[in-house]
Amino acid sequence: MVITSPRDLAAAVRGRRASLGLSQAELALRAGVSRPWLSKVEAGKTKAEFDLIIRLLDTLGMTLRLDVADSKAASVNLDAILKDYES
Amino acid sequence: MVITSPRDLAAAVRGRRASLGLSQAELALRAGVSRPWLSKVEAGKTKAEFDLIIRLLDTLGMTLRLDVADSKAASVNLDAILKDYES
DNA sequence: GCTCCTTGTAAACGTTCGTATACATTGGAG
DNA sequence: CTCCAATGTATACGAACGTTTACAAGGAGC
């Protein structure tokens, strides 16, 4: 699934944890984070540090991938070209 | 590409910025972050906040996706089952 | 050699992080 | 009804965040 906000991440983490049959306490222990922190992440309510997120996702057996959004890339690229032209 | 560490993210961001022909100053301005912060992210040297990362990637026209790693998921699931059994 | 651009990094600052601990609430099992 | 597990959230604390500002270094162009 596409992650465009902390809330997207929250839903993915909670759903995945449920499907693995883990409690917050158990997952937090395995991921090496605190349970209140995990609770906040699952509520989409914290500006979590990226490396803690990576560790959490790895514990859940989930992989983060980066794709280039074609239409958006084209748009950004065009903007860059236009900007260069105006310079 | 797969992101498993801040260094993976660093390489992806720097490469993408170069391919768009943008300076750090220009990208930071567009993404609404500071240039020293961006420099650190591109060096893989900061525990950046997840929502700043999302904003940066969006500005670069890049999309974050989450996949379930099948083999790893199976491993985690088995571990959970074994743990339940031992309880 | 000079100027300019880009990038890396330091210092100071205010803000907010994550943690440990504690407590309240809710839902489910017995 | 009682008890327990799970979850949400508050507090206090030490640590580190991101920003602004400044400076250094390297390279390109003249």
Image: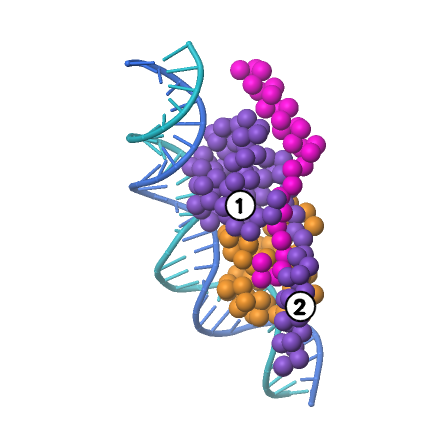
Chain colours: A purple, B orange, C cyan, D blue
Q: Nearer the viewer, residue A62 or C9?
A: A62
Q: Nearer the viewer, residue D25 or A75?
A: A75
In which quadrant is the N terminus of chain A drawn? top right
SS for dot 2: helix
Residue A76 versus residue B77 in the image, above or below? below
In the image, residue B83 lies in the stretch drawn in magenta: yes
Q: Nearer the viewer, residue D30 or A19?
A: A19
Q: Main secondary structure of the magenta part?
A: helix
Q: Quadrant of residue A61?
A: top right
Residue A8 circle label: 1
Residue A66 versus residue A14 in the image, above or below? below
Q: Is residue B74 visible in the rendered structure shown here?
A: yes
Q: Earlier in the sequence, mark 1 or mark 2?
A: 1
Segment colored magenta:
B58-87
The residue shown at (53%, 15%) is B87
In the image, residue B48 lies in the stretch drawn in magenta: no
Q: Chain of mark 1?
A: A
Image coordinates for residue B20, horizontal then vertical, percent:
67, 67
Image coordinates for residue A34, horizontal then vertical, percent:
46, 36
Residue A60 versus residue B34 in the image, above or below? above
Image coordinates for residue A50, horizontal then vertical, percent:
54, 48
In which quadrant is the C terminus of chain A drawn? bottom right
The residue identified by callout 2 is A77
Residue type at the position of mark 1: Asp
The residue shown at (50%, 63%) is B33
Mark 1 Cα-neighbour bin, 10 Å: few <14, some 14–19, many ≥20: some
Q: CA distance from mark 1 to mark 2?
A: 27 Å
Q: Horizontal placement of A22 versus A78: left or right?
A: left
SS for dot 1: helix
